[in-house]
Amino acid sequence: MWKTIFLPFHRITPENRLPPTNNRLLTIFAPMRQISFLIISIAIIFSMQTGCRKDPITTDSSARLRFSIDTIVFDTVFTTVGSSTRQFKVYNDGNKSVNIASIKLAGGNVSNFHLNIDGSPVVGTGNILLRGGDSMYVFVDVTVDPNNSNSPLMIEDSVQFETNGNHQHVILNAVGQDAYFYHNEYLNCNEVWNNDKPHVIYGYAVVPQCCTLTINAGARVYLHHNGVLAVDSCATLKVLGAFGNPVKFQGDRLEADYAEEPGQWGYIWCSSLSKNNVIDWAEIKNGTIGILSDSLGGSANPTVKITNTKIRNMSLAGIFGQGSWIEGENIAVQNCAQYCLAMAYGGKCTFRHCTFGDYYDIATRTTPCVLLNNWYKVNDLVNSYRDLSQADFYNCIIYGNLDNEIGLDSNSASTTQFHYYFSHSLIKTNVNVSSISHFLSNVYNQEPYFHDISTYDLHLNASSHAIDIGDNTIGLLVPLDLDNISRFNNGIPDAGAYENVP
């Protein structure tokens, strides 16, 4: 807005006239002082009026803010009631001003977080003019009591911005309970995780090259959205749970609504060239992929051996091998959006006394419970092939709510190996099972009669067709079931991970 500004003008009077002097230069320059003062005054007025002129304000809906960070993590591990402050910058990269209609906490007055904008603590504010090319600071603090066992494991909120109808946000995360917290980091070499406090992974936690991470019985590992526990090359993961005291992996949302919600975190990744990974007596649920295992790398031992473990509610797959070597005994995998088990791009595997039961009902599933594959598409013109040198299933159950629960995906144009074998198992399938080199002494398309699939209970009812169909030789290799009960109470082992007890 233009504004007229009056400045006092210095008037020469007899009282303030320069004293008499014989110096002609002083006499000559005295009036010029008045002229200079007038020029300076005009310049000041022009400058002030120019400074008051506002940049044009854009109302374009494509105008967006830029933030110095998209997620703020308060990663201090508090042992008492604690508070911490972080800051971020908001940028207007355009050449016109924008009016930020609203800045507020999504959680409102009940949020654990607090904002400070322009030096004032607020829950929300608005109508903030941010000039083109300019930026502003937003300060955020959080107060939590991590010793309150009723607190969420992680506290999450967001700072929401509205500009010209655009809604943007910066995510806020803080530790809600006392825990060990890992945020996009490589772990210490040969680290040991015990069960004294939860272990929370935000982003990724990586077992470094040629080191070992040991996770002992009873430890609880919580992974934030897309969180990954990864094992680098030459490194080893040892999950050493115990009967009645398993190691638990799940998402960090502990509310009842998330208790059985798939897709809350990423995966446990036994990466290429990792070695001798062991997962024993674990419970893994509600992720994207329970265990992702990459190529063999020429190891003399399996990339990962999984025993006495339950995996469920995965938004992609329970176990996904990519040219990998996997061995499994006494495992129960269920309710996965695509596969309970996928051996993709070749590799080799052996599974004994395992139950794969897929009744995923959150969305329509069109893929089989167990997939075996020895090729992949590089591009529209080129395929790549890898040997599936071994895929053996002994005394297993492979069942679900599709007509066919085994997928045998071999490219017939290739000479690549595709070896598979199912023995003394209960299988739901419509593939040709006449070849005894691939199928021997199995039961087909007969109900396993699980106790209660709605509560994830894959124990066998007394009428199950999986009872007493197992091979004794295989049973001797895995003499105790997933309940730690002998498989030979009735003389012949049942198929699957659980022995029926009359």
Image (cartoon, helix red, strand yellow):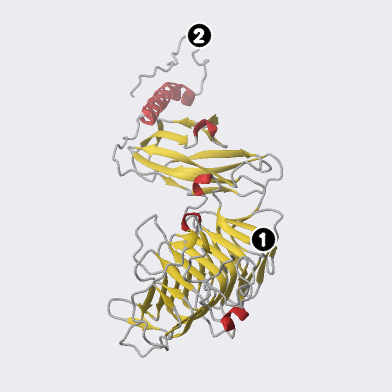
Residue beneath label 1, please?
A: 244
SS at mark 1 in the image: loop
Q: Relative to residue 32, is residue 364 depicted above or below?
A: below
Horizontally, residue 219 falls left or right of residue 103, namely right
Q: Front-most of 459 and 224?
A: 459
Question: Which amino acid does the dot numbered 2 rest on?
Answer: Glu
**Residue at 41% in and 59% down:** 360
Quick one: label 2 or label 1, which is nearer the N terminus?
A: 2
| Within-10-Å neighbours for mark 2: few <14, some 14–19, many 20+ | few
* 116 horizontally vs 336: left or right: right
What is the residue that sits farthest to the bottom in this orientation?
415
Q: Quadrant of the N terminus?
A: top left
Q: Looking at the image, is mark 2 or mark 1 nearer the viewer? A: 1
**What label sits on residue 15 in the rendered view?**
2
Which amino acid type is shown beneath numbered disc 1?
Answer: Gly
Query: 10 Å neighbourhood of mark 1: few (<14), some, or many (≥20)?
Result: few
Which residue occupies 32% across, 35% down? 57
